[in-house]
């Protein structure tokens, strides 16, 4: 029996070792996870939360974005992690 989780957005199965992004309603695969440019896009109707479930401020989102870019990441990189 296959116990892999499925992506909340596309419903495709996600391998145990694949990067994922946690959502309050389930799990997203790397292809469906938000990107770093979406993290700082204030025109989107979405929010990002910290480990305690509290919404991240614009400045906190910018710090995460800037750290990703400084580490050699691209704005279009998926925020999914292993």
Image (cartoon, rainbow, N blue to C red):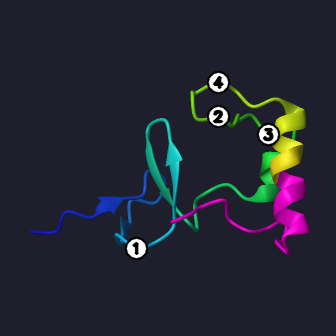
Q: Magenta stretch: dominant SS?
A: loop
**Distance Cα–Cα, label 3 vs label 4:** 18 Å
Q: Which residue is mark 4?
A: 54
- Of callouts 3 and 4, which one flags the residue occurring earlier in the amino acid sequence? 3
Q: Which mark is residue 17?
A: 1
Which percent across, then down, holds residue 57? Answer: 82, 29
Which percent across, then down, holds residue 26? Answer: 42, 44
Judged from the image, the secondary structure of the residue bearing numbered disc 3 is loop
**Mark 2 in CB contact with mark 4 (< 8 angstroms):** yes
Residue 81 in magenta stretch: yes
Which percent across, then down, holds residue 17? Answer: 40, 73
**Distance Cα–Cα, label 3 vs label 2:** 18 Å
Judged from the image, the secondary structure of the residue bearing numbered disc 4 is loop
**Mark 3 in CB contact with mark 4 (< 8 angstroms):** no
**Distance Cα–Cα, label 1 vs label 3:** 30 Å
Camera-near label (3 vs 4) is 4
Segment tinted magenta in the rendering: 65-82
Left or right position of 68 against 16: right
Q: Quadrant of residue 67?
A: bottom right
- Of callouts 1 and 3, which one flags the residue occurring earlier in the amino acid sequence? 1
81 is higher (above) or lower (below) than 23: below
- Of callouts 1 and 4, which one flags the residue occurring earlier in the amino acid sequence? 1
In the orientation shown, which residue stands out farthest toward the top?
54
Tell me the residue at 87%/46% (across/down): 63
Question: How many neighbours does mark 1 have within 10 angstroms: few (below 14), some (14-19), or many (20 or more)?
Answer: few
- Of callouts 3 and 2, which one flags the residue occurring earlier in the amino acid sequence? 3
Question: How many neighbours does mark 2 have within 10 angstroms: few (below 14), some (14-19), or many (20 or more)?
Answer: few
Camera-near label (1 vs 3) is 1
Q: Which residue is mark 3?
A: 44
Which percent across, then down, holds residue 1? Answer: 9, 69
14 is higher (above) or lower (below) than 50: below
């Amino acid at each position: 029996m296959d116990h892999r989780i499925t992506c909340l957005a596309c419903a495709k199965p996600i391998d145990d070792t694949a990067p994922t992004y946690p959502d309050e309603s389930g799990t997203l695969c790397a292809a469906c996870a938000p990107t770093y440019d979406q993290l700082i896009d204030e025109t989107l109707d979405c929010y990002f939360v910290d480990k305690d479930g509290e919404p991240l401020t614009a400045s906190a989102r910018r710090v995460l974005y800037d750290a990703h870019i400084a580490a050699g990441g691209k704005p279009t990189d998926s925020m999914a992690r292993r």
